[in-house]
Amino acid sequence: MPTNGEAGNRDLDQQNENQVGLGPWLGHIVRFVVSALVLMGVGLIVPGFSRMTFGTALFAAIVIALLGFIIETIGGEQISPYGHGLVGFISSAVVIYATQFVVPGLRVSIIGALLGALVIGVVDMFIPTVVR
């Protein structure tokens, strides 16, 4: 006989299955907007990282996510820009540096990419930009 907690969980599961529309998309949109705002902030405080408009930062956030996905697909989570440790930090800096070649209006020095990866990593600890 199911308890009230189990029945409540089934009801929640049913509600989640019935939700259609912007639910999953809204999470991605919020993630990219937050990422763009973080990149704009990084551009203001990190030397060697250009200041950006919101449109440029949003495009850069999308490119960084795509490059990160490609790296994670090829190398696994250990070398993912979202991974932990030195390898994740270095791959984040490489992704940020490489993004400038795709996004017009974004200029990043090597030091700027390293500092940007550090700042973004610290900010990501408090405001996660990855929907899990």
Image: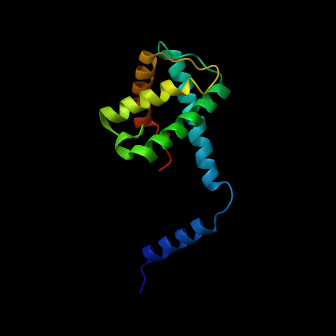
Furthest-front residue in view? 74
In the depicted structure, whether residue 19 falls above or below residue 25: below
Rendered image quadrant of residue 56: top right
Q: Residue furthest left?
A: 85
What residue sits 39% from the left and 26% below the top? Answer: 118
Q: Position of residue 124 (x, y in %)?
A: 44, 35
Left or right of residue 101, residue 8 in this image: left
Q: Please tell me whether residue 15 is drawn above or below residue 30 in the rendered image.
A: below
| Residue 131 image position (x, y, % from top left) | 50, 47
| Total marks in image | 0
Nearer to the camera, 17 or 56: 56
Q: Specify the farthest residue to the top.
A: 47
Residue 5, above or below 118: below
Q: Picture quarter containing residue 101?
A: top right
User: Residue sitting at 43 percent across and 45 percent down?
Assistant: 74
**Along the line of sight, the residue nearer the viewer: 74 or 43:** 74
Q: Residue at x 42, y 79 (%)?
A: 3
Residue at 50%, 22% (x, y): give it: 42
Check the image and tell me how it is coloured: rainbow
Q: Residue 63 in the image: state x and y as whole percent.
A: 57, 34
Furthest residue toward bottom: 1
Say which quadrant the N terminus sits in: bottom left
Question: Residue 10 at what x, y percent from top left?
Answer: 50, 74
Specify whether 79 is left or right of 35.
left
43 or 1, which is in the foreground?
43
